[in-house]
Image: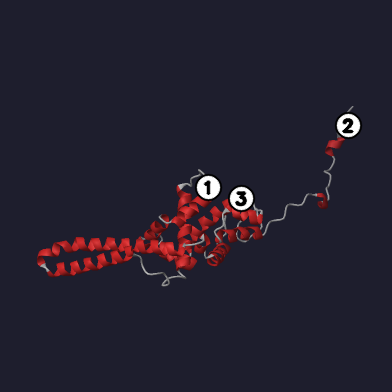
Amino acid sequence: MHNFKGLNMPPIKIKRSRLPKPPPKLKNRYVKNAKQSEYKFLRILRGFAEAKTPNELHAESSISVRTIRDTYWELRGKMFEALQTDKRLFGGAGRFLYPYGRIEQQGEILLKAVSQSDAFASLVALQYPGNREPTDEQCGLLLIEMAVRFYCKSSSTRGKLEEPPAAVMQLQAVILDRIKDIEAAEQDPASRWTVGSLKIEVEHKFAELKLVELQHALKAATSGHRLSIDPSHMIYGDMRKYLIKHPIQ
């Protein structure tokens, strides 16, 4: 006959010291529920600020390329967010690109100038070697990143650029001629009907002039080594400042 009394025995008490200890939570003020330490994250942030590729940073830090690449995309998203949330950051780039919460004409001109630059093509090639192609969202974030880098750089070099190229001087001359044409047409009753079209032409020429000036400034700021476009101290400091209040989720 089986004895089933043992089934009603009180549960065995296990000493707390024998229970496996939960893994310690990593301290990281910049990433919620982080799987990497704050030190490692800041090492990646520093590499991002210095415009290092994932492979370059991996060779220096032994952090996996995948972790670096994924963190870079998180940082690009946060940079885009910061431009609209705190317009004082990055030398006031948010005020220039998103003065009223959306891209205005001056922002469009800057982004167009950046997208047509050799520096941007080089950045895309470095981030996507071989046959890989970035998605539209990724390309957009790269474009914003390059625009911020250029704006940060240009904020400390304004007024120090070389003499404007011939294309700029030619456009300036055309604009002056059209302004004289407008003044003359306003004085001539038979030609007043042309004033409206002349003013529209002048507006288009001003937009074209801004684009050419930005392209020239961008070329001057990015000449030489590619890190010359990277004011790392400003980007690193402002990203840290923003992430303390708005950590990565």
The 10 Å Cα crowd at callout 1, few under 14, some 14 to 19, many 20 or more, is few
Q: Position of residue 48 (x, y in %)?
A: 56, 58
Instruction: State how far apart marks 1 and 2 are (Cα).
Output: 73 Å
The residue type indicated by label 3 comes to: Val
The residue type indicated by label 1 comes to: Pro
Between 25 and 162, the residue placed more toward the observer is 162
Q: Are marks 3 and 1 in contact (CB under 8 Å)?
A: no
Mark closer to the observer (1, 2): 1
Quarter occupied by the C terminus? bottom right
In the image, 233: left or right of 221? Answer: right
Between 222 and 83, the residue placed more toward the observer is 222
Q: In the rendering, which numbered label is found on residue 178?
A: none
Q: Which residue is mark 2?
A: 3
The 10 Å Cα crowd at callout 2, few under 14, some 14 to 19, many 20 or more, is few
Instruction: State how far apart marks 3 and 2 are (Cα).
Output: 62 Å
Sequence-earlier tag: 3 or 2: 2
Q: Position of residue 145 (x, y in %)?
A: 48, 58
Q: Which residue is mark 1?
A: 129
Instruction: Judge whether 177 appears above or below 80 on screen.
Output: below
